[in-house]
Image: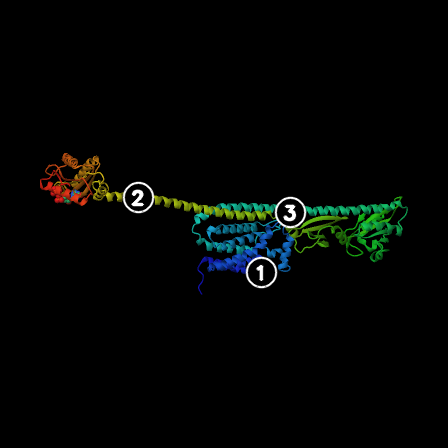
Amino acid sequence: MRLPTRPATWWLILTSAAAAVGFANALSISTVTLITSTLALWASLIQREVLARSLAGLTLVLLLPGFLSYITPEGWISTAQWQAWASGVLSDSRLETWRAPLLVTLTLALLALSLLLRQLARLGAPVLLAAALLLLCTQLIDRIIGHDPPTLLHYNASGGALFTLTLMIATHIAFVWSHWRDKRYIGSALWPAITLMLLALLLWQQQHRYMESALYQRTHAEGKELISRLTSDIQAHRQAMRRFSRFWQLLDEAPSAQQWARQAADYHADFRYFLNIAFIANDSQVTHVYPPTLLNRNIQGQRLFEAQPSGRQALAPALQGESKGSTGLVELLQGGPGIIYYWPIKTANQTPVGAAAMAVSIPMLADILFAPLTPEHAALRWHDNGNVLARFGTSTHPGPWQHHYTLTLGQEPLTLSRQPNRDYLLSQMQRLPSIGLSIALVLAYLLYLVLYTFKRLGEQHRAMRFSNHMLQREIKKRSQLQKEVEWLARHDELTGIANRRHFLERARDDTQALPLSLILCDIDHFKRINDQLGHLVGDDYLKATAKLGAALIEQHGGIFARYGGEEFVAWLPGVDHQHALAIAEQLRRQMMALSLAHADDTPLTLSAGVVTHTQGEVDMPRLMQAADEALYRTKTQGRNRVASAKTD
Ligand SMILES: Nc1nc2c(ncn2[C@@H]2O[C@H](COP(=O)(O)OP(=O)(O)OP(=O)(O)O)[C@@H](O)[C@H]2O)c(=O)[nH]1
């Protein structure tokens, strides 16, 4: 078996192991999506792009409901509805099973999106990966810092998921790093996007913390308000008890059973948590009890000093008419925890005749006091040093916070613990920070795309401008060359005057102005110049002759061309024969006057043959031949002369 060589493969093996361990430990959307993302990475590694994209798409689909639950306003779909949906899909499952923490949802979604976009930098894969990395760092920092009180909304990953996510992002980076060739553009487009994301994350965290802390304070205040309402309810029954005990001062003697029953019935109707309202005679004997239930009748006639010695300390002063009193928390004779209040009963002349005992059942009191509350909001626990006296509300999804308050009943300070329900708290949380964070991530993505495209286009524009410039230079060079070629095609390179081709073109085109004359010139003994003075001197002489001839002939509206070697030819339209002979003679004389000399100091001379065409079609070869014959004659006659050719 061959071991994988790429480092990314080793990373991926580790990631898979971590994801598998997480999946085996708990079935939740976090663990499932970690598995699908890991499989997508595997598919990408073995270059099964379609499979990789399908798995990435599946990851996104699985994460979508959870993500929506974070950003949909409570008024549109309530937390209770999301919760009902979650338990509907998998019975008894909690919302958390179907909803990964916010930052995990975003991190995995960004990774999946990056896989979906085939890691292409121009589609924004780098910014998605950078955002995932940033979210991961936030979660790591958050985990290190911790929270007190604990956060309501667990928006970061558990330790295991965090480990898997770290490996997954490292693997992903190892994969894509080599894909990105134009890192320069990526870098310059990435930093502003990362800065925006960082700001958004800081703002989000700040807002989130503030919101949670405000909600914590609010639930604490709700508890305090509840306590003050319960305290004033308890105060009300104390007032009622006082009124009840004073009523008997209107009488001259201890109350009769009928009087007691009639009076107690009214109070009992108002305060149903009084298990009984009893008249205790001076000897602590229970004389009258209301309501006359079986339990109450059982205690009638009992002496409380003996039957309930724990209450003696409170009862004795009341019987002596000195002060009211109450027991601590006791087990009532009727059963169940309670407190008994004792109030002195005196006659009109202030003679103590007994005491009124009012037994308050704590569970019944709790039932009545808590009845107006909404059980879905919070669970209440009324307890005395851990000994639970009464409970209220459901605690299927308890929230993370518990507030403790003291609620004094009689002399007894009892503790009331209030734990707001998780779903209730979630319904109170605003979704704005999550919406803000999501929008900021989208904006950062768009910012990256704009900057990246802008940079690339800029670079392409620069490259285009450069190649345009090069092209223009090339065109200029070529057109110059073209001109040169064209010039060379029609001119003699050495002397710069027209060449034979140019001459023949001109002679062909310019035949209208008759008569027209042709002069054929040849430098005499030019071979000697070359032989004795060298070719360079020969060239200079040729140039001087050309210059001289061109200047003279152009004066007469003609063209002077080098016909070949040391031969020149002049085309003179509209010039008759005599005039042409005079021009040729002038040229010959000027040539001698140039003081170009042979090695023996004799001047350089030229000979010329002149021919004129006076009528009809121009026959160029015939004209040339006639001029050449005339020239030949000059040579045979001694050179340095002008000869006239026979004309028609
Ligand atoms: N330096 C130089 N010499 C040239 C050029 N073209 C032709 N020649 C020379 O011109 C000379 C022409 O010689 P020939 O045809 O014998 O005529 P010639 O010596 O002038 O004698 P005649 O015409 O009979 O007076 C040759 O030696 C050629 O090499 C050129 O471009 N430069």
Q: Quadrant of ligand 1?
A: top left
Q: Is residue 257 left or right of residue 605?
A: right
Mark closer to the chain start, 2 or 3:
3
Q: Secondary structure at mark 1?
A: helix
- Observer-nearest residue: 100 or 282? 100
Disc 3 marks which amino acid?
Answer: Leu
Q: Residue furthest left?
A: 637
Q: Secondary structure at mark 3?
A: helix
Q: CA–CA distance between discs 3 and 1?
A: 33 Å
Q: Quadrant of the C terminus?
A: top left
Q: Position of residue 272 (x, y in %)?
A: 80, 52
Q: CA–CA distance between discs 2 and 3?
A: 81 Å
| Residue hosting label 3 | 215
Q: Is residue 364 left or right of residue 443?
A: right
Q: Residue furthest front?
A: 616
Q: Position of residue 611 (x, y in %)?
A: 16, 40
Can residue 364 be seen at all in this image of the molecule? Answer: yes
| Residue hosting label 1 | 25
Badge 1 residue CB within 8 Å of ligand 1: no
Can residue 531 be seen at all in this image of the molecule? Answer: no
Q: Position of residue 292 (x, y in %)?
A: 85, 55
| Residue hosting label 2 | 479
Disc 1 marks which amino acid?
Answer: Asn
- Observer-nearest residue: 271 or 145? 271
Q: Is residue 377 left or right of residue 326?
A: left
Q: Secondary structure at mark 2?
A: helix
Asked whether the residues under the numbered discs 1 and 2 touch, taking CB atoms below 8 Å apart as contact, a structural biologist would say no
